[in-house]
Amino acid sequence: MTGKRTLFVTRPSLPPLADVMPMIEKIWASRILTNSGPYHAEFINGLKSYLGIEHISLVTNATVGLMLSVRQLGLTGEVITTPFSFVATGHALLWGGVRPVFVDINPKTLNIDASKIEAAITPRTTGIMAVHCYGRTCDVEAIEDIASRHKLRVIYDAAHAFGVQHKGQSVLKYGNLSVLSFHATKVFNTLEGGAIICPDKETKEQIDRLVNYGIVDEQTIETIGFNAKMSELTAALGIVQLRHIDNYIEQRRLVDARYRELLANATGIRFVHPSGMAPSNYYSFPILVGPEHGRTRDQLYQALRDNDIYARRYFFPLISDLPMYKRLPTEPVRELQHATEVADRILCLPMYADLSAAEQERIAAVIRGL
Ligand code: T4K
């Protein structure tokens, strides 16, 4: 390759095409393309054993997975959530006719501050939608405790948390439902895709029906379902990706470690995650640009772009600042102080398996102002 390549915030990891081709040929020969075919079943089994989870429903993407989760749990009224997330988190609630109530984040973890949830509970509150932001585990114990005392249902937006462990088990075991994203930008990707992690067989069956129009059998439609079915092509790619995921994560761990070395004493740059944060999937490499840096976050973002480095301000603006959310009566702005500060300082650096050491040096040089 000649010249410098443009560096995006992420670059999807893909297996060798030759590994996928025999499966595509089988799909072509069988003409079973979707609606719970053999690869769909095989992919679920692979995920069950990799994630250490018993009940999984596949969906077309995490946004729809979150929407169906809201429906499955019968959430109404108000749901407490974080403003510091991708817009899909809030949109899934609005689509379900539920009003999101935004609670500030913990400035260390950037996840919803569990100690502030109770103050936001009203008689209309039916649930909590928390996000394991950048794959860092929420305060799941505190959230569980609040939910059980107030009889609230909990959905974890686990879009970033594929394979993340908490206290020796999958973090996906917490809450009533967790939703994974397999989007191209994720550590584990099937181009588009996602999964809903269910606590038991019965819930999984109900969700599988929601995914397929509510169909029980040829003449029985049980509920107002959606079409959120994963195709056989997507599932086949997922099966192959599972063979490589440990390698992708290990390569990302090396990228993470190199950033820590290269930016160790960069003025005004703070790492969001502690070094060797374990167990993690190294979804992202977020930094906070402090006032001592000399440039604002946006000036640094622009300086990187001028050098063909497309870092991203995930998550800016806050969901609560978007027009359709601003109109909602919400908590006083001062309550979102940490989220507001972080949204103004956050920058996610390029993070992907095949980011080279030389490319990271190039990124670090711009950040250091060299
Ligand atoms: N909850 C959370 C917390 C999430 O972060 C997300 C998604 C969801 C829920 C919903 O999950 P899904 O419904 O998507 O399964 C991207 C993704 O579209 C989105 O999935 C992701 N979070 C979000 C954080 O990022 P954009 O609009 O910022 O992506 P885009 O197209 O600007 O891509 C970013 C960079 O990635 C590009 O500059 C180049 C690179 N890229 C992207 C794609 C799509 C590639 O190299 N190849 C590609 O195919 O939203």
Image (cartoon, grey):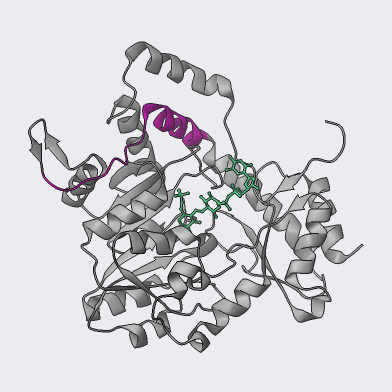
Rendered position, 120 above or below 262: below
Report the front residue among 209 and 174: 209
Report the front residue among 204 and 46: 204
Does the magenta run of residues contain 239?
yes
Report the front residue among 165 and 8: 8
- Across and down, in percent, residue 99 comes to 33, 71
Report the front residue among 158 and 49: 158
Is residue 164 rendered to the left or right of residue 95?
Answer: right
Is residue 323 rendered to the left or right of residue 252?
Answer: left
- Across and down, in percent, residue 294 comes to 84, 76
Whether residue 138 is visible to the viewer of this picture, yes or no, is no
Rendered position, 179 above or below 112: above
Which residue does the image show at 33% across and 14% down from the upper left? 30
- Determine the image quadrant of residue 151: bottom left
Which residue does the image show at 35% across and 27% down from the upper left? 39
* Quarter of the picture holding the N terminus: top right
Seen as rendered, the residue at the extreme top is: 29
Which residue does the image show at 86% across and 65% down from the upper left? 368
Does the magenta run of residues contain 27?
no
* Magenta region: 222-243
